[in-house]
Amino acid sequence: MKVEQIYTGCLSQGAYYIESNGEAAIIDPLRETKPYLERAKNDNAKIKYIFETHFHADFVSGHLTLAQQTGASIVYGPTANPSFETIVAKDGQVFKIGGITITAIHTPGHTMESTTYLLKDESGKDYAIFSGDTLFLGDVGRPDLAQKTNEITQEDLAGILFDSLRSKIMPLADEVIVYPAHGAGSACGKNMMKETVDTLGNQKRMNYALRADMTREEFIKEVTDGLAPPPLYFPLNVKMNREGYTAFDEVIVQGTKPLDPETFERIANETDAIVLDVRNQTEFVKSHIPRSIFIGLDGGFAPWVGALLADVEQKILLVVSSGREEEAVTRLSRVGFDRTLGYLQGGIDAWRKAGKEIDTMESITPDIFKEKMEDNISVFDVRNDGEFANGRISYAVHAPLGFLNQYISSFPEDDKCYLYCAGGYRSVIAASILKSRGIHNVVNVEGGFAAIKNVGISVEI
């Protein structure tokens, strides 16, 4: 038996490859199927099943493409209602893969179709659970994504999740391994550990949601407390996972189409396409296409695209470092952004040589920022709520990047405004969005809050 976690840091997402005696199963695959196909080929194995723990909201799964490529059956848990052929498993239904079995355990609460898959080894012993978004390490899945007006509330879902955990998961043996769908950094939970694998016994000891003496009412209160609004792209990804999507290969071919500066500019002018610059922030600061949006590949790229662009139907034109074109289109497609129209061939150098307009962004060191603070300047902190609460410049206005659109009116149009985040990535994203909205007097503070503290600027907690 072979069990392999395939972890994607940008999405904080874990997919799983399981193989036994020439048969394989994939759990919660990403959009690009090559990694799973290669593993099966290397093991001389046939992919028999594709198990989905639920209809994912934060990424588009590769279940449809992988099923077409391999003939494998797609399996969802009870109550699932996809628009394509699938096995809707019954609670307790057993699936055989080589010499091992996987049992579908219906664990609703995060969503109503949420299902945990229990792997039993060749001897029939419980070996591991693939818990999806039902149970994370240090946390459980948020119960607000599947609520429906006048039908079911987040409190209702939290209560259902409490019952699922107590009746289906906690009775399992302590040595059972927990393989979750996400780790720290995912918007699907709020208190996840940085580790991506643990034992159920350790989770029973340290996960607040699995306290043995916890009442149902306490669980509902703690799980629903402090939930930030989900990113706007979440329901659009659920729809794609339930109803289908464009073939991944077609998305790649279209998105990696090279466009000379004239064609790039014409398409930008004739369509509603956003010019998305995915280079490093230092390159963007030095020179970029006016009104382009920066979200760098080397940060939390895909989740920020989803949170800030929101509409998966949005057309996109890419400015990307040479050799990273396919990577950019792939990572966009993971969160459902399939309408990339091509990339600027030759990058900013080609744009400049063609005589096109170039913009820059003012960016200063923390030392210079410290000097500027002697004047009455406008300072904005674009970190999230938890970061802001743990330390900040006393008079900084809090405008978290994920909800920047709600704070646009807070930024002065004439006076300079200074932006900082934790390390300098999110502040450049925020500044680029402001500039695209006509607010040009923005200044990025390099190195963010970490660098600010290092130069002796006073902060409060």
Image (tube, grey):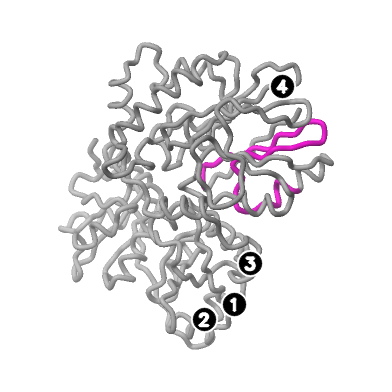
The foreground one among 204 and 262 is 204
Residue type highlighted by circle 3: Glu
The foreground one among 332 and 103 is 103
Mark 2 vs mark 1, foreground winner is 2
For numbered disc 2, what is the local secondary structure? helix
Q: Residues within 10 Å of mark 2 (few under 14, many from 20)?
A: many
Asked if marks 2 and 1 touch (Cβ < 8 Å), the reply is: yes
Q: Which residue is mark 1?
A: 345
Q: Which residue is mark 4?
A: 121
Q: CA distance from mark 2 to mark 3?
A: 20 Å
- Whichever of callouts 2 and 3 sits on the residue coming sooner in the sequence is 3
The question of residue 21 being in magenta is answered with yes
Q: CA distance from mark 2 to mark 1?
A: 9 Å
Q: CA distance from mark 3 to mark 4?
A: 39 Å
Q: Quadrant of the N terminus?
A: top right
Q: Is residue 225 left or right of residue 68?
A: left
Q: CA distance from mark 1 to mark 3?
A: 20 Å
